[in-house]
Image (cartoon, grey):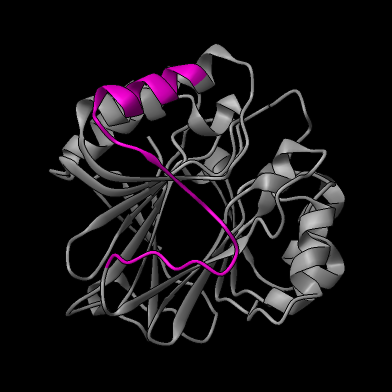
Amino acid sequence: MIVLAGVVFYVSSPDHSVPVSEISGPKLSVHFLDVGQADCILITAPNGKTMMIDAGNNGDADVILDYLRSLDVDTIDVMVGTHPHEDHIGGMDAVIQAMNVDRIVMPKVSTNTKTFYDVLKAVRDKGLKVNTAKAGMSIPLDPDLQIQILSPKRERYESLNDYSVVIRLTYRQVSFMLMGDLETLGETELLESNDQLQADILKVGHHGSSSSTSARFLKAVAPQYGVISVGAGNRYGHPNPKVLERLEKVCQVLRTDRDGHIIIETDGENIAVRKMKE
């Protein structure tokens, strides 16, 4: 571990892990922002284009926008709302209003909340439209990246969580599985599909809830790292102790409640992890 100006550079034991200084040339950076009991992921592609997946709670907009500005980001090329729960789309309207946004992707499901309507209003006010996320779609961002939508696989689910847009992101030899709040039903659908599920980094579904990350699914993904977006002392008891134990047996666990913003960078072969805890 190396500490410089409050930033922790962490090098761990998995096969492809290296110091941050050894990641050179065109790189993919995936930022898991610390937005408490919520999700927000910023992806910066090797060609400089950006993608945001979810945008925290309503009260997280300033944290997200400050972070984007600290990186001199003024354009989000693709904005994905995994599903219309407030802890995933709460800050989307503010980001859409403040940034240049080119494309919006969300599942075809609505909810009768002010948060959801605020997002739709921001989309309309910017003259944008919502592109419907479906399994089998790919998202163009960088010719060197494969961004595949694996879920939702059907049009109707009982739980909003199972509408979650699941994305498998691949840069050369390194892959990420980004799960939103997908639960057991959605995981089972993925396991029964012909999709490639193995990934080096797993964004753990539903904040580490017991309703996600089954043993069978975790075995199929076989990650080196598991990243949990979760708030300290949350009332849900996330991450669930059994899920955490399951993860710790197979991978290194990173948590935004303990590690702050988590940045994973790769040149397509090596992986470096930075933790930014205030």
Residue 27: which quarter of the image?
bottom left
Residue 66: which quarter of the image?
top left
Q: Is residue 94 magenta?
A: no
Which residue is depicted at the point 59% across and 75% down? 224
Q: Nearer the viewer, residue 226 or 134?
A: 134
Which residue is depicted at the point 46% across and 41% down? 40
x and y percent of residue 90 in the render? 48, 24
x and y percent of residue 139 in the render? 39, 64
x and y percent of residue 205 in the render? 68, 51
Q: Is residue 249 visible?
A: no
* For residue 83, above or below residue 50: above
Relative to 211, is 164 on the left or the right?
left
Q: Quadrant of the N terminus?
A: bottom left
x and y percent of residue 150 in the render? 60, 66
Which residue is depicted at the point 66% across and 78% down? 195
Q: Nearer the viewer, residue 109 or 146?
A: 109
Q: Quadrant of the C terminus?
A: top left
Residue 127: which quarter of the image?
top left
First to last magenta residue range: 117-141
Q: Is residue 259 visible?
A: yes
* For residue 264, above or below residue 62: below
